[in-house]
Image (cartoon, grey):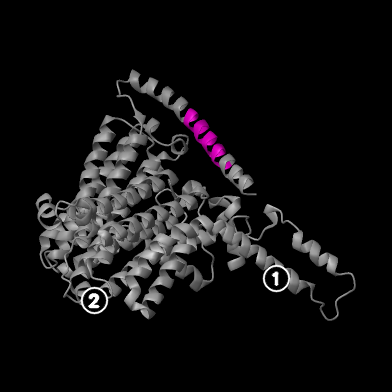
Amino acid sequence: MGENDDSEIIEHHVDEAMEKKASHRSHTHSFLESVTSSEREGHSSTQSSHRLLAYSDALISIIATVMILPVAHTKLEESEDLSESFRLLMTTKIGVYLMTFLIVTVAWAAHIRLFQVIERIDDFLALLNLACMMLITFLPYTFTLMAAFPEKILGILLFCTCVMVIGVIQAVIVIYGFSRPFLLNEQIQISENQAYYKQHILKVIMRVPIMCLIASIFTFIFYQLAYVILAIVIFLPYITQSLKWCRSKAIGQPVEDTPESMLFYTYHPNEPLSKERVEAFSDGVYAIVATLLILDICEDNVPDPSVVQSEFGGSLVAALRQYGPEFLAYFGSFATVGLLWFVHHSLFLHVTRTTRLMGLFNTFSLAFVGGLPLAYELTHEFPRRSRNALEAVQISCVILFFAGIFQLAIWVAALFDERRLLHPLVRYGGRDHVYMLAKLGLYPAVALGAFFLTCVLGEFSTSIFHLMQLGVPLAFLLLRLLVRAGLALLRVLLVALRKQPQPGAQEGGGGGVEARLVEVEDEDSRVPFSDLVS
């Protein structure tokens, strides 16, 4: 059965690859025709945007993730109370990290939408994109400046200026792209309403720079209001969609479904996002987090040769023995990062399309994954069986819980439109539905269990946490067997319950019950998850 499931997934992805190749051939064909005509007019040649987008995704994922370094490298004394220090000092830094991560990923999502419209580039567009990347990577510094000096207007002005220039550059890219239709995606190329698309996209793009201009003006009058306007700018898409949903519920009218062809720049939860770019950005975050872990080992855990000679008699093994807790924390943290990536990979292997809502949950999950270097630093910073060690382990459990629970939220969001977004194997009632649920729920359940266990056995909190980190890989290896055994046991219990004679039951009705137990439902006859919830 497992081989059949794997073959179905492979066939599914082979079909996807064939569709992409066919689409690529059609795009290449139309492109060659367009380039021929453009070259006659003296225009520069164009090329695929794949490498430029891969570079942009890598750059943005790096700048979003490394903002955890000021938090993770905050030195705390063993005599300090961790809860007090965490509240006074690190809460501000963690807030800055989460907000900068959100701001950068919002800019990245806007970049995805822009290059879903423009599929081919030339030298001019490549240079404009580099200028846009430079300003996006500068945004975390401006926001950090705002957080450090909230009463100074310079930080607000720098942030607003960066956002306004980014908006202007994106508007220039759109205008330039529509002036050369062969750069656009095929849907817009063949559309008779290119002017409408252009006007709509420019209106959405310029909305943010205009609000930032208003915020920068208010910095000279009442700077607190400028912060409110900036918060509205960041959360405006989610606020407007929430208000639309509340209004539809209040007046009793269902929200009208927007056709997929009209989902460009709508901020609708079902607005499509490039699955390949979501995966590339996520892989970048996981890779950078794993790299940050080994950088800490290389920086702090290489003994000085003179110390090895004077204090350990030249024995490098004896000198390294004192770093045992650090190495244990490293291997446990690396295993955690790797397995979270494995769960993410397994989920998106069965996702056929991604939406804006799924991308939002993915952003929240990655933000907490980016906090794992902080968990690594905390779990080996303090001596075992101390109050600080207990609180450090509990903070790490919270980080791990939210990193896993938002991965589960991605899948739940996809289930509400499962026929369009998910492979049949993991849809509600599919053969791997329960297995995927177990895989996504393992880390949140284990982290929550470890948290409550440390509340009872506080003296062994560090040992419990490291045992959890190193024991979860074994659980993943046995997970499919455990799920199958659990389902088989549940099936036996259901059969035993249904075989019990019911009062008033007709004679000979047992055969019908057994037949219904082994009946295999047709895929089209299954009740969708969204209908079940309704």
Amino acid under label 1? Leu
Front one among 261 and 392? 392
Q: Which residue is mark 1?
A: 493
Closer to us: 13 or 42: 13
Q: Is residue 459 above or below residue 216?
A: below
Which residue is depicted at the point 80% across and 67% down?
513
Q: How many residues crowd mark 1 within 10 Å: few (<14), some (14–19), many (20+)?
A: few
Pick whichever, 173 or 130, lies toward us. 130
Q: Residue furthest right?
A: 507
Q: Is residue 507 left or right of residue 295?
A: right
From the top left corner, tell me how far across and down residue 432 is, in percent: 59, 55
Question: Is residue 110 found left or right of 274 in the rendered image?
Answer: left
Image mark for residue 83? 2
Give me the residue at 60% from left, 51% from top: 424
| Span of residues in magenta | 12-26
Q: Earlier in the sequence, mark 1 or mark 2?
A: 2
Quadrant occupied by the C terminus: bottom right
Question: Is residue 526 visible to us here?
Answer: yes
Q: Position of residue 10 (x, y in %)?
A: 56, 41
Does any portion of residue 102 appear in the rendered image? no
Residue with the most extreme front position: 313
Q: Are marks 1 and 2 in contact (CB under 8 Å)?
A: no
What predominant SS class does the magenta segment belong to? helix
Secondary element type, mark 2: helix
